[in-house]
Image (cartoon, rainbow, N blue to C red):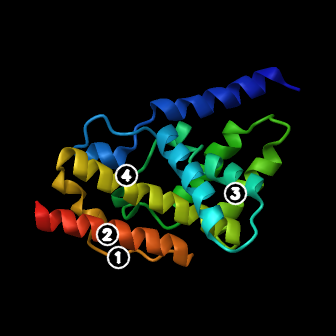
């Protein structure tokens, strides 16, 4: 085992605790969550979804994929979705792939983790679709919480266009979040 490579990997993972979720910061959310907090939210949401969906999932794969999904942001930072429109097609994924390769350099399990990350980005398996749903659900839940806590109306853009999820259980949760937000707007 190359202890130096493992410590380097751990350091990259730790960097996520200091990497702000840029989209929240751009929208004026004070004390916005960092990428590590979001990653925990995705892991936790994936755990919940696995209990709700009547389909067998390899929990180890789901949770590992959820934990790894934003690891490249330890090097690339969090590039918010409004900025993606200015990037050439495929560039964000290509840059993140290079970052993943650098982060995993010389780690004996690099190929396994890279396979998980690639599977997520291909989005063709039930596991990848579940993690994608968990990622988006965590974001929408956080947007609603921030709106309720801060009254920040800059977050309304998250709700303008309805989102479609892969699994009906995730869709039902999202639909209820939208409904709760709508009832808050009527009250407020």
Query: As displayed, is residue 103 above or below residue 54?
Result: above
Question: Number of callouts in the render?
Answer: 4
The residue under label 1 is 162
**Residue 146: image x %, image y %?**
28, 48
Element type at marker 3? Answer: helix
The residue under label 4 is 142
The residue under label 2 is 178
- In this rendered view, identify the residue nearer to me: 187 or 5: 187
N-terminal of the pair, mark 3 or mark 4, is 3
Element type at marker 4? Answer: helix
**Residue 12: image x %, image y %?**
61, 32
The residue under label 3 is 62
- In this rendered view, identify the residue nearer to me: 10 or 170: 170
**Residue 62: image x %, image y %?**
69, 57
Element type at marker 2? Answer: helix
Report the residue that reaches farthest toward the right. Answer: 1
N-terminal of the pair, mark 1 or mark 3, is 3
**Residue 177: image x %, image y %?**
35, 65
Q: CA distance from mark 1 to mark 4?
A: 16 Å
- In which quadrant of the rendered image does the C terminus lie? bottom left
Numbered badge on residue 82:
none
Query: As displayed, is residue 152 above or below residue 119?
Result: above
N-terminal of the pair, mark 1 or mark 4, is 4
The answer to the question of whether label 2 and label 1 lie on touching residues, with beta carbons closer than 8 A, is: yes
């Amino acid at each position: 085992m190359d202890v130096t490579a493992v410590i380097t990997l751990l350091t990259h993972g730790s960097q996520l605790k200091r990497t702000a979720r840029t989209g929240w910061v751009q929208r004026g959310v004070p004390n916005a969550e960092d990428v590590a907090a979001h990653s925990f939210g995705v892991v936790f949401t994936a755990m919940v979804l696995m209990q709700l969906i009547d389909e067998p999932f390899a929990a180890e794969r789901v949770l590992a994929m959820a934990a790894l999904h934003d690891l490249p942001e330890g090097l690339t930072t969090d590039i918010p979705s409004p900025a993606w429109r200015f990037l050439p097609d495929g560039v964000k994924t290509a840059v993140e792939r290079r970052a993943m390769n650098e982060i995993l350099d010389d780690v004996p399990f690099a190929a396994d983790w890279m396979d998980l990350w690639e599977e997520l980005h291909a989005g063709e398996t039930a596991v990848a679709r579940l993690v994608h749903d968990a990622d988006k659900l965590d974001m929408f839940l956080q947007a609603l919480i921030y709106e309720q806590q801060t009254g920040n109306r800059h977050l309304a853009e998250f709700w303008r266009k309805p989102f479609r999820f892969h699994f009906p259980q995730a869709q039902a949760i999202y639909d209820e979040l939208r409904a709760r937000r709508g009832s808050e707007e009527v009250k407020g």
